[in-house]
Image (tube, helix red, strand yellow):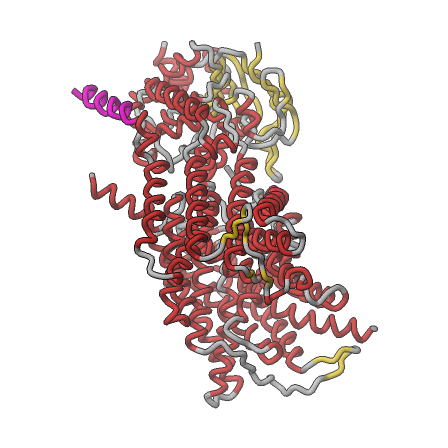
Amino acid sequence: MESLAHSKAFASERRRAPTRRWAGPRTGGIAALALVIALAPLVIANNYFYDVAILVGLNAIVCVGLNLLIGYAGQISLGHAGFFGLGAYGSALLAARYGFPPLAALAAATAGVALVAFVVGRPILSLQGHYLAMATLGLGIIVSIVISAEDRITGGPDGMAVPPMAVFGFIVQGERTWYWVVGACLLVAVWLAQNLVESPVGRALRALHTSEIAAEVIGIDSARHKLMVFVLSAVFAAVAGGLTAYYAGFITPAKASFLHSIELVTMVVFGGMASTFGAVVGAAALTVLPQALTLLKDYEMVVFGALLMATMIFLPRGVVPTLADALRRGAR
Amino acid sequence: MTALRVERLSKDFGGVRAIHELTWEVRRGTIHSIIGPNGAGKTTLLNLLTGVYAPSAGRIVCDGRDLSGAPPHTFAAAGVGRTFQNLQIFFNMTALDNVMTGAHLREPCGLVSALLHTPRLARAEGECRARAMHWLRFLGLERYAPMAAASMPYGALKRLEIARALAAEPSVLLLDEPAAGLNPTEAREIDALLKQLAAGGTTLVLVEHNMRLVMGVSDHILVLDYGRRLAEGTAAEVAADPRVVEAYLGAAEAAVAGHA
Amino acid sequence: MAGQWAQFVAGGLTAGSVYALVALGYSIIFNASRVINFAQGEFVMIGGMSAVSLVATGMPLPLAVAGAVLIAAVVALLLEKLAVARARRADVVTLIIITIGASIFLRGLAQLVWDKKIHALPPFSGDRPLAILGATVVPQSLWVLGATVAIVAALSWFFGRTLTGKAMLATSHNRLAAQLVGIDVGRVLFASFGLAGALGAIAGVLVAPITFTSYEVGVMLGLKGFAAAMLGGLGSFAGAIVGGLALGLLESLSAGYVSSAYKDVVAFVVMLAVLFLRPRGILGTLQGIRV
């Protein structure tokens, strides 16, 4: 009797297995996100809301990458705004001062950031816990201070202007055009991230998050994997930074600040650790929230700080995974 | 045919010498046990044999290659697998994923193919999944496959850790107290499993306190005391050695007597 | 030239003393719980700003200082009880983010309770500069240095002679053993926060007459104080002093002789150097991890 039930369960699992590809979060979730992006303009009333949506998208791209580092690999970075800022300023400088075509500038700046992340990543990721946190924090702040101080090159605290992004002669400008550009980039980012999560690399990351020793003993080179995901998350941040620069037409060192780094971590943590869609939700929630609070601008910090504390105390895994668990339990 | 050999191996922790000039050899295809009182250095030795600790002195040779001081993943690549005394299961994954992760070295995957989920990767994943199910079935765990590891009972988790280690198809498998916390029935199952593995050609090294298991299964026993080799030999030789009996083998003597 | 050098040293020692006091706060809490309290800098800010408010109500300065220290200590105790205690079993990253959230929360609260402007506290004993060993020093600097020395002496007595202090010291050496001999480590953590809050506030009050204070002043001071704690050895009390003074001097001398635009960078470069080259700092002890 028991074996019948078991073989039934196993048979249904076997039946489910080949269809997993189509129903899983990778394709199902991405399709849902694509739908949301495609249909949202129907409800977007004016340019201001397009602007908010674009900001959500840009933050989400960074958060999806950062979530791979924090949520899956279990590391921490309190300085990711540094990579964002380097991507932004790198693209801006190459385009404005050296006449690079904007896409080439973006690519070159991203490659540069990847190199920086690779070089600093090796020593930094050998640190654990709070030492790693402080090292990333230190690096992020050093980047923002350097950007501010080298005002001859970067325009200093007042920022610098960025030429518009032109692709094969077509100038990308205006909220509606940028909405589609950012939406497409976000879909690509989510697709890449989900692919990674469900691959052997993704399993290796989750493994070393739980037990680095067991992972190593299995043959997972944890240092190499941590570095890989660190560089990848830096690349996501750099691309988002470059796009932000082109979109806004202007960048300031505030984009590389410690506060921005914390905002990014908050989004990932709030939305959900080890959940790509959680990262998107977190970015959306915490980009829209300050906008909604513009009337109560003075309360922004208090709410942010309280939210951060409350999430980590009561929902340490973030909103989306906790909700998903509750739904799963309710369904059973 | 030597699978593993250590030569004058020593390990210090600050002022404490945990392993002292140990020279020892494990022959291919046999079941070796390491026994000794608590604190004798058994787990330390396992940690040294898997690269978790680097030796303070001496050499570790695996299959002819000197691996002293190499990181754990290098030992894994050389065919050394291991289970832990305190479960190191990946609780944030399903049982199936745990075993699939165990096969990490068998499914090399670059960053780009992972990001793009190439068709070749999809095929490799399918094969990996099938092989993982095979190992789960081998250990009687197939019903746990889609379940979160965190919800599995303790006995099943001990077997899961073995399944995960086997997924790498190691030539030498080190097991740290595989019968700890198991009832007599479960322990007998482990006994049968170990014999089956050895018959299949896997070299096994066991750290165990369960004397009945050790005496019944081992081809060769190493007795450690305060990090040094106290005695070595077959079960009968070790049980008869007066130094061993004096050190702690009262329980084992009774077990051997019960066996005979 | 010699005068310039002395000037930098004087400035460096003054800033360094403040860093040392902040660093002590980090070490005390780290010892009790292995947590890095990112909100430490905000205790400094609360101390300075509270003192300003209390002075504005007409309170005499010494009373205002005491009041400010008390307020910051209470805030610190509340933080421990309401936020940190609840998440004590959480992992390091979670705890770090909680204290970061606390620091943002406190800063936002300060913005509401006070305002965004810069405020000054009257110096303790006038502001006529004195000439000492070739340097021009404001009397407040001497207060800073003197108070730091007094505090270090008081803390030595506290940790060496009082039961609470010894309990805190025991907990920092071996938490489990401390619990086994009956020390309530939860209460030790509670007290540690209070003490760290008080120390931070004292630093804030001491330095407010020199560098002024505002709701934002805690961020950089907190981070630099942490760099000082790392430099001296996180968890070591002597290290906090050594690290603080060393950092203050490094900062001052590099700002004077190398570049003043990059003055703030020094602390972080130092922190990174310590993390990469000698994580245990100058006076810290090696802590191995047993598998």
Q: Is residue A220 left or right of residue C88?
A: right
**Is A124 placed above or below C82 here?**
above
Q: Position of residue B65 (x, y in %)?
A: 63, 19
Residue extending farthest left: A1
> Residue drawn at (63%, 70%), measured in percent from left and top?
C17
| Quadrant of image for the N terminus of chain C | bottom right
Asked whether residue A160 appears in the rendered view, the answer is: yes
Q: Is residue B227 left or right of residue B194?
A: right
Whether A10 is among the magenta residues is: yes
> Residue drawn at (66%, 78%), measured in percent from left and top?
C141
**Is B256 placed above or below C120 here?**
above
> Residue drawn at (40%, 16%), measured in percent from left and top?
B194
| Residues drawn in magenta | A1-16
Q: Is residue A196 left or right of residue C2?
A: left
Residue extending farthest bottom: C58
Residue extending farthest right: C1
Q: Nearer the viewer, residue A106 or A117?
A: A106
Q: Is residue C277 left or right of residue A206?
A: right
Residue extending farthest front: A169
Q: Position of residue B154 (x, y in %)?
A: 32, 31
**Is B111 placed above or below C113 here?**
above
Whether B215 is among the magenta residues is: no
Q: Nearer the viewer, residue B219 or C127?
A: C127
Q: Position of residue C37 (x, y in %)?
A: 49, 60
